[in-house]
Amino acid sequence: MPSTSLHGASLGDRIYRFTTTAFAASVPLLLVLLGVEVMIAAWPALKAFHFSFLTSSRWDAVEGVFGAAPAIYGTIISSVLALVIATPLAVGVAIFLSEFAPPWLRQPVAFLVDLLAAIPSVVYGLWGIFVLVPLLREQVMPFITDRLHLGNTPLFSGPAYGPSMLAAGLILAIMVLPYISSVTREVLMAVPRSQREAALALGATRWEMIRGAVLPYASSGILGGVILGLGRALGETMAVTMVIGNRHEISSSLFAPGYTMASLIANEFSEATNDMHLSALMAVGAVLLALTLAVNMLARWLVWRVARQGR
Amino acid sequence: MRFRTLAALVAFPAVALTAGAQAVDLTGAGATFPYPIYSKWFSEYAAKTGVRINYQSIGSGGGIRQLSEQTVDFGASDAPMSDAELGKAKGGKVLHFPMVLGAVVVTYNLPDAGKTLKLSGPVLGDIFLGKITKWNDPRIAALNAGAKLPAKDILVVHRSDGSGTSFIFTDYLTAASPAWAAGPGKGKEVQWPVGLGGKGNEGVAGQVRQIVGSIGYVELAYARQNKLSYAEIQNGAGNFTAPTIEAITEAAASAAKKLEKDTDYRVSIVNAPGKKSYPISSFTWLLVYEQMPNATKAKKLADFLKYAFKDGQQSAAALDYAPLPTNLIKQLEKRVAGLTTGR
C-alpha cells in the first residue's frame, strides 16, 4: 500500500476535502440566500412603514396599512409562557427518569414522553379546539376568576371565550416538553458517577446530591434543551393558529385572544394578491427569522457562559 | 402551511404515477370554495371525453398569481380580479366566466330562541362592528317579534385566514350597511373591529357551536352538511329569505337582467333586488386568457366550458351550489364561442 503523507495530499484527498468543504459551505450559504430573498421581498413594506411596522397594531389589508406589533408580541409571550410551564415539568420528568425511576419503568415512560414529539401539530390543534379550549372556558378560567378572585388582575381580566394566549401557551408547553425533557435526560445521564458518589460520600441526601452536584454540572446542557424548545415554540404554526383566536390586539390578559407571526403568515399568505400585502407578510417572515436568529445567538452565548462557570 | 406541505408530499407520488401513464391535458389552480363541484365536473368530463384536467385548490390568490405567470392554463377565484391584477397578467386579456353560485350563511348559537332568527344588513353590520353587543338589543328584537332573545353578550366569530367566504360576506355588509362601508370595507382579509378569528369554515363553525351567544358566517354547503342553524337575511327588496338553492339562483337572475351588454362579468350580486333572492350570494369564476398560446388547449378548454354550462349545472344542487340562471347561461355560451376562434 502506498503511504500518504500528511502534507502533500494526493488527488483523491484533495477532491474529498473540496467536496466536504462545499457541503459544509452550502448550509450557511442557504441561510444567507434565504435571508437575502426574504429581505428583498420584505423591503417595500419595511420602507413604507418604517418603525411603525414593528410598533403599530393596525393590520388592514383593505387600506394597505400594516403593523405587526400584536403578532410580534404574541409570538414572544406565547413562547415564554410555554417555557415557563414546560421547563419545570420537563426537568422534573427528566430528574425522575434519570435518578429515581426503577429500570423497568424508565424506558416505557421515556418512550411515551418522546412520543409527544411525534404527534403532528394539526392533531394538537384539533385536540386544542375540542378538549383544551372548552376545558379552559368552562373549568379553568371560571376557577381562576371566581374561586381565586383574580378576575380583576390585568393577567386574568376580560371575558373567557376559550381561544386565548393562555390556550396557545398551554398547547405549546405540551409540544416543547418532550424536547426539553429528552435533552435534559441525556445530559443528566451523562453526569459522571464519580460526581454523584463524591456528593453522597460527603453525607448529602439524594435531593442534595441532585441539587448540589448533578444539576450544576448539567446546567449548560439543560439550558440548551430549553432553547431548543423555545426555537420550536417560536415557529410553531398550525396548532397555535387553531387555538389563539387570531386577533390583532395587544392585551395584558392571558384570557384575551392574540396572534403570532407564524399564524399570520399561514392565515393570509395563500389569499394575498396585493403587492404591499405580500410584502408585509414577507416582512413578518423577516422579523420572525431575525428573532429566531437572535434567540439562538443569545442561547449560544448563555450556554457558553454557563459552561465556563460550571468548570 | 405544514398541513399543505404534507398533503403535497402525499399527493406527489400519486400525481407522478398517473402523469406517467396518461398526460394531463389542462392544468388549473385557484379557489378552494368550488373545489368539490369542479372535481366532480373534471372526473365526469374525463370519463365522457377522455380530456384530463388537473386542478389544484391552492386558494384564489395563488390561482390568480399562477395564471398571471402563465404556469397554469386557467385560474379560479371567488373574488373577481382587480384592474391592477388584470394589468399584471402576462398572457394578455383575462376573461371572467361565472361557473356556479354559492352563498354565505350567518350561523348563530341561541338554543332557546324558539324560531329562526331574522337579520337585516344594517343590524348585521352593527353586530360585526361591535355596536350591537347584546342579543336582546331593541333593533334585533324589532326584527324578531316572538323570539326569545337572552340578555347575553354577542360573540362575533370571523375567518382568520384569507378567503373568498370573507370577501362575499364583507361585500354584502359593504352593500347593505353604510356604517360597515365607512369602516372596514370589503376584502378577503379585513380589519375586524371585534371578535375571534377561526381558521377555515370548521374553525368558525367549531367556535359558534361551542359558545352560546356567538354568531359567525360560513359557506352554505358547509352549514348544510353540518346541520348548523342559520338566519334569514333581508334582501334588497325588503323580504327575509333563507339561503335555498332557488333563492340564490334568483339573486343571480335578477342581477343578470341589469347587466350591461358588454359586461366583463366581474359583478357582485350581493343584496340583489329580486323579491325572493338571497342577498349573500356570489358567483365563483374561472379565469381564462382570451388568447391562449396553444390552439389545442384553447379548444379543449372551450369545450369543457360548454359542458360545464350545460350538463355541469345539473350536478350543482346536489353539492349545495346553485346553478346559474338560464338567461345568463345563454350569454355565457356565446362568450365561449368567441374564445375558441380567438380575436
Image (cartoon, coloured by chain):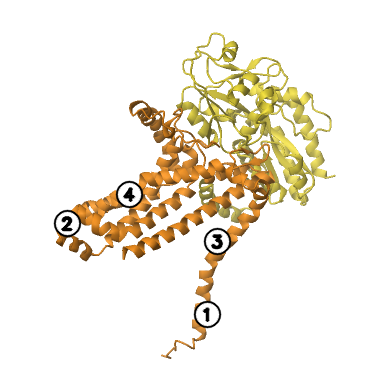
Chain colours: A orange, B yellow
Mark 3 vs 1, N-terminal side: 1
| Residue, disc 3 | A31
What residue do we see at 45% from left, 52% from top? A231
Compute the Cα span from label 3 to label 1: 25 Å
On whether disc 4 and disc 1 are found on a single subunit, the reply is yes
Mark 2 vs 4, N-terminal side: 4
Considering only vertical position in the picture, is B135 above or below A84?
Answer: above
| Residue, disc 2 | A204
Q: What chain does mark 4 sit on?
A: A
On whether disc 3 and disc 1 are found on a single subunit, the reply is yes
On whether disc 1 and disc 2 are found on a single subunit, the reply is yes
Name the front one of labels 2 and 4.
Answer: 2
Residue A89 is left or right of residue A231, and the answer is left
What residue do we see at 68% from left, 17% from top? B276
Considering only vertical position in the picture, is B114 above or below B158?
Answer: above
How far across and how far down the image is residue A308, in percent? 36, 65
